[in-house]
Image (cartoon, rainbow, N blue to C red):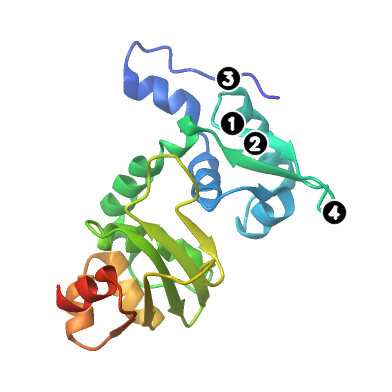
Amino acid sequence: MSPRRSYDQYCSAARALDTVGDRWTLLIVRELLAGPRRYTDLHADLPGVSTDVLASRLKDMERDGLTTRRRLPPPGAAYVYELTGRGAGLLPVLQALGAWGEPELGGRRPTDAVRAHWFALPLLRALEGGTGLVEVRLDEGVFHLRAGSGDGAGPVYGDGPAPGEPDARLSLDTATCTAISRGELTLADAVRAGRVEVAGGTPLARELRER
């Protein structure tokens, strides 16, 4: 475990960066907002991180009270990492950072990796005000998210179809989702333009169609 480096400044922003300012830490938090993950799954969804750096960051995050590690019962019997309440409290930080970074997104570079669930956080911002389980179908894959979550009580998104019947299903292409992520298009405008199909008969689905 690496010794903690500090800015040695009596400032809450500096103290926060002492804990989460290292490269990869906030992206590990992004992945763990989906719930418990195995080391191999984290490594697969963090292209570019070395195994040594990932292991070191996870140890640091456990030391700093952001994550815990536990062993799954048989037949899984694998170790998984998950966020503590303090770690889950970084969701609004990532939301604000993502919103601030929208102008930097630009076009996708040939070297850029992409995972469908990386669109979950910008879509959560776009769904602000709604509450419910939403399944999202993109060219890149399917994921689900929980609009109105973020209280640290559980995962805010996950890979694959929604567990159980979702309150709404969104179908859209990656170009539309990217435009929403960049802040170039609102979800409401995309729905009105027919670029997002909303399925479901729940209050949330009706609200999304009528915004």
Q: CA distance from mark 3 to mark 4?
A: 37 Å
Q: CA distance from mark 2 to mark 4?
A: 24 Å
Q: Quadrant of the C terminus?
A: bottom left
Give the foreground label among 3 and 2.
2
The secondary structure type at the circle numbered 2 is: helix
First in residue order: circle 1 vs circle 3:
3
Do labels 1 and 2 touch, CB within 8 Å? yes
Give the foreground label among 2 and 4.
4
| Residue 110 locus on image (x, y percent) | 50, 74
- Kindly identify which residue carries mark 4: 75
Instruction: Report the number of numbered marks.
Output: 4
Which disc, if any, is residue 58?
A: 2
Do labels 1 and 3 touch, CB within 8 Å? no
- Crowd band around label 1 with a 10 angstrom C-alpha radius: few (<14), some (14–19), many (20+): many
Which amino acid, mark 4? Pro
| Residue 9 locus on image (x, y percent) | 37, 13
- Kindly identify which residue carries mark 3: 4
The secondary structure type at the circle numbered 3 is: loop
- Kindly identify which residue carries mark 1: 61
Nearer to us in this view, 25 or 137: 137
The secondary structure type at the circle numbered 4 is: loop
Which amino acid, mark 1? Met
| Residue 18 locus on image (x, y percent) | 47, 23
Which amino acid, mark 2? Leu
Q: CA distance from mark 1 to mark 2?
A: 5 Å
Which amino acid, mark 3? Arg
Vertical placement of residue 150 versus 46, above or below: above
- Crowd band around label 3 with a 10 angstrom C-alpha radius: few (<14), some (14–19), many (20+): few
